[in-house]
Image: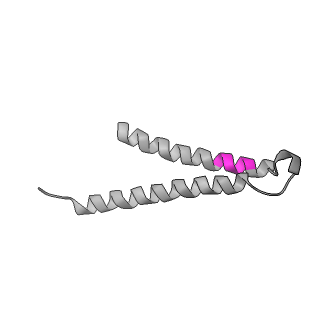
Amino acid sequence: MHVDWETLGAIAVVAAAAAVSVVLLVSLALVASSSRAGDPAAGGRTPGGTAVAGLCLLAAALLVGYGVHLIIA
């Protein structure tokens, strides 16, 4: 049995980078959505923080969706 170590290493690096990217984007979304500035009656959320949180979650969803697409295809 032959193992292509170079390809296996490349796959491991890409998988680790994707996992770190998704975790980083979701954590940034949580930080952005919990900003303390703004009207306390509105939960302390600012429109800018909510927009950044939405973009971060969208980017994370696109990364996951692309990974699923690669698995299915």
Q: Quadrant of residue 42?
A: top right
* Image quarter of the C terminus: top left
Q: Which residues are magenta?
A: 50-55
Relative image position of residue 71 (x, y in whole percent): 36, 41
Task: State the quadrant of the N terminus.
Answer: bottom left
Residue in view at x 48 percent, y 41 percent: 65
Q: Is residue 62 magenta?
A: no
Lateral position of residue 66 relative to residue 61, left or right: left
Is 54 contained in the magenta span?
A: yes
Indicate whether 68 appears above or below 22: above
Give the image quarter of residue 54: top right
Rendering coords of residue 64 (x, y %): 48, 45
Q: Is 50 on the left-hand or right-hand side of 40?
A: left
Is residue 69 depicted above or below 49 in this figure? Answer: above
Taking depth in this image into account, of 51 and 30 the one nearest to the observer is 30
The residue under the point 73% across, 54% down is 34
Q: Position of residue 14 (x, y in %)?
A: 40, 57
Q: Determine the residue positioned at 43% across, 45% down.
A: 67
